[in-house]
Amino acid sequence: MTELDNKKIMVTGGAGFIGYHLSKTLSNFTDTLTIYDNLSTGKIENVTDVPKAKFIKGDILDTETLYAQEKMDVIYHLAAQVVVPYSMENPMDDFNTNAKGTLCVLEKARKDDAKVIFASSAAVYGNPPTFPTPESYGFHPFSCYGLSKVIGEQYCQMYREQYGLNITITRFANVYGPRCHGVIHDFLNKIANNPDKLEIIGTGQQCRDFIHVSDVVDALIKIGTMTTVNGKVYNIGFGKTTSILELSNMILAILNLQNRTSVTTTNISWPGDVTKIWFDITNAKKELNWQPKVTLEDNIKEIVTERKIIT
Ligand SMILES: NC(=O)c1ccc[n+]([C@@H]2O[C@H](COP(=O)([O-])OP(=O)(O)OC[C@H]3O[C@@H](n4cnc5c(N)ncnc54)[C@H](O)[C@@H]3O)[C@@H](O)[C@H]2O)c1
């Protein structure tokens, strides 16, 4: 018996990449799981593949629809605009979804007295001088996306302090795995289309902390079941950093393409792009009794085998 058993649980953004994996696992705990998503980037198959969940096609900014949903015990808030360059081109839209949208979800939680687990991001740190970066480093966002996540976090803290809501904040590093978007997915698509050439957007020197989605879901479930995490903020990453060039070399070595594929870089980074992400995950390991298990190399081998990419 856990804190999540038979609870009424809502996952905003449940039709997205991480939301799908989380919802699938949560449906083992409860028969009253609601996926709330406007399908702006989410996919309907991510919902139909979680058959036990009830799906509401709704926008978090549409408070009439959001508040009309049944009283929840737990809300995992993952719905967001997640693309950094888009946030730089469309800061108002990014603000509305990520900052105002989070406020709408918190109001739903306040009405229901629901526990909230908020998905924040490495982007709140910007370009920190300290590596690995601990949660205590603070906020120095380098993009509108990072700033809108900071605002979301600060509303969470305000609602906890002033309204007594039970809230935990998770900051994700670079999440990858089945159904993901992002750099690994892009590289594998490019190589499948043309194994002779791989163009890296940016300098290739950018470093990221890659964490498998199953490890992220594991941390989110632990947080949902624990009573000691109210008000806590956790970095959820692998605790290792890998440059994009190293990543491309790893992928090409696994595919046995090192001598065939020519790798080039555009050498231009995009507005809001950060240089390095490398999380200090000491707190999550100690307080959640959690440990990331999937290594990048092992997972890429699995994806390559699964996708039957030519070598
Ligand atoms: N994937 C990563 O590497 C990563 C890293 C750091 C933080 N995060 C955070 O994790 C969460 C999930 O990210 P993801 O990678 O699964 O992204 P995703 O784009 O796959 O999922 C986001 C989901 O939110 C939905 N959505 C967007 N705006 C909405 C709105 N106004 N109302 C209702 N639904 C809306 C989309 O349709 C989509 O299904 C996000 O909050 C993101 O900021 C992700």
Image (spheres, rainbow, N blue to C red):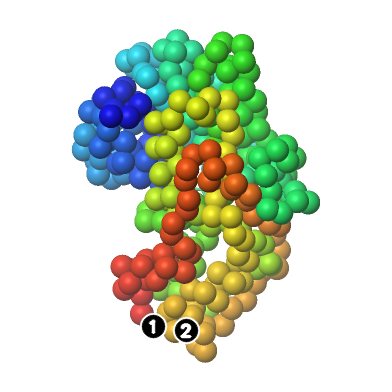
**Where residue 67 sits: x, y (%)?**
40, 14
**Where residue 218 sits: x, y (%)?**
41, 44
Q: Residue at x 32, y 15 (%)?
A: 70
Q: Viewed as shown, does residue 262 lie left or right of 16? A: right
Q: Viewed as shown, does residue 292 lie left or right of 92? A: left
Label 2 and label 1: CA atoms lie apart by 6 Å
Do tag 2 and tag 1 residues touch (Cβ < 8 Å)?
Answer: yes
- Mark 1: which secondary structure? loop
**Where residue 224 sits: x, y (%)?**
41, 31
The amino acid sitting under disc 2 is: Leu
**Where residue 28 sits: x, y (%)?**
25, 37
View extreme (right): residue:
129
What residue would you read off at disc 1? 311
Which of disc 1 and disc 2 is earlier in sequence? 2
Q: Viewed as shown, does residue 285 lie left or right of 65? A: right
Q: Residue at x 61, y 71 (%)?
A: 245
The amino acid sitting under disc 1 is: Thr
- Mark 2: which secondary structure? loop
Question: Dot 1, how many residues are within 10 Å of its Cα: few (below 14), some (14-19), or many (20+)?
Answer: few
Q: Residue at x 39, y 31 (%)?
A: 225
Q: Residue at x 38, y 83 (%)?
A: 311
Residue 146 — which label? none
Residue 130 visible in the current orientation: yes
Residue 257 — which label? 2
Q: Nearer the viewer, residue 52 or 187?
A: 52
Quadrant hosting residue 240? bottom right
- Asked if ligand 1 lies within 8 A of label 1, the reply is no
